[in-house]
Image: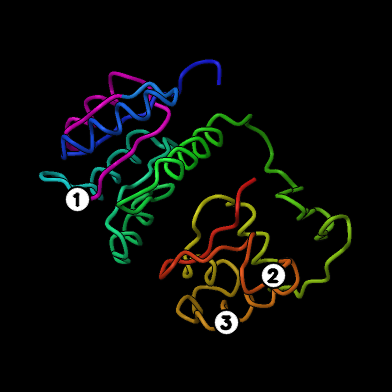
């Protein structure tokens, strides 16, 4: 990126906010700061940011409501939520509120910056028709021919396996909730049938992973869903 990507850090903890300001700045980002949700909305009206890092636990408006407001006023602006580890309900509600992704505290800065660069890259990707061919690592999915290959060798998938893989690869790098996968592939009445999804994921891993017990491509987001690794 020739021009510095602008990231707004919304965090009420002054220590964390300062640490992120200094660290992300040193890594090449232009960083803005907001103490709470109300200030974030003011900042976003003044500066065109490329992404927002938003703490979920803040006084006043709160992270989830701030996320909803940002999505309403600035649709398409990527938001990464900073959440407390293992708080499943908060993570699910954040994704439902419109967050692109989440990172749990305490987080590794390498993971955080990778997520940031990913959502910013996607936001600035050329507009046009959705890609009919998805390639991640050794896996190629050709949606036009409903063909999946690994290292050039065709992999035979059952219909539900194919649709699950396609959905995950279309969202590569982002978590996809169990319920969203089930509704998309099996239909709304099946949104709670997680066993169906577990069976299909296990079968997919056997077919595309070198070591299904230690998957490289289809990653489990504990209590949330699945994420397909991004290149």
Q: Is residue 143 visible?
A: no
In the rendered image, which quarter is residue 228 located in? bottom right
- Decide: is 134 above or below 86: above
The residue lying at 76 percent from left, 75 percent from top is 158
| Position in image of residue 63 (x %, y %) | 23, 47
The residue labelled by disc 3 is: 196
Neighbourhood count class around disc 1 (C-alpha, 10 Å): few under 14, some 14–19, many 20 upward: some
Q: Sort mark 2 into few (<14), some (14-19) or many (20+) by Cα contacts within 10 Å.
A: few
Q: Which residues are magenta?
A: 32-56
Residue 42 belongs to magenta span: yes
Contact between labelled residues 3 and 2, with CB atoms less than 8 Å apart: no
Judge left or right: residue 46 versus residue 214: left
- Mark 2 or mark 3: whose residue is earlier in sequence: 3
**What is the secondary structure assignment of the residue under circle 3?**
helix
**Mark 2 to mark 3 CA distance (whole Å):** 22 Å
Give the number of the disc on residue 57. 1
* Residue annotated with mark 2: 211
Tags 3 and 1 in contact by the CB under 8 Å rule? no
Viewer-nearest of discs 1 and 2: 2
């Amino acid at each position: 990126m020739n021009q510095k990507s602008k990231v707004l850090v919304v965090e009420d903890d002054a220590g964390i906010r300062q640490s992120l300001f200094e660290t992300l700045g040193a890594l090449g980002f232009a960083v803005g700061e907001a103490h709470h949700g109300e200030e974030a909305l003011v900042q976003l009206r003044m500066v065109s940011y490329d992404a927002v890092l938003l703490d979920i636990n803040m006084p006043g408006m709160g992270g989830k409501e701030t996320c909803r407001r940002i999505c309403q006023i600035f649709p398409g602006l990527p938001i990464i939520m900073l959440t407390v580890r293992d708080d499943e309900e908060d993570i699910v509600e954040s994704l439902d509120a419109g967050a692109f992704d989440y990172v749990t505290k305490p987080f590794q800065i390498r993971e955080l910056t990778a997520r940031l660069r990913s959502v910013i890259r996607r936001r600035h990707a050329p507009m046009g028709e959705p890609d009919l061919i998805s390639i991640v690592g050794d896996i190629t999915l050709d949606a036009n021919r409903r063909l999946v290959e690994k290292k050039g060798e065709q992999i035979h998938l059952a219909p539900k396996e194919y649709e699950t893989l396609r959905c995950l690869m279309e969202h590569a790098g982002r978590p996809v909730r169990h319920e969203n996968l089930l509704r998309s592939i099996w239909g709304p009445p099946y949104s709670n049938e997680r066993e169906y999804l577990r069976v299909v994921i296990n079968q997919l891993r056997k077919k595309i992973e070198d070591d299904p017990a230690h998957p490289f491509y289809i990653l489990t987001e504990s209590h949330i869903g699945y994420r397909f690794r991004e290149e």
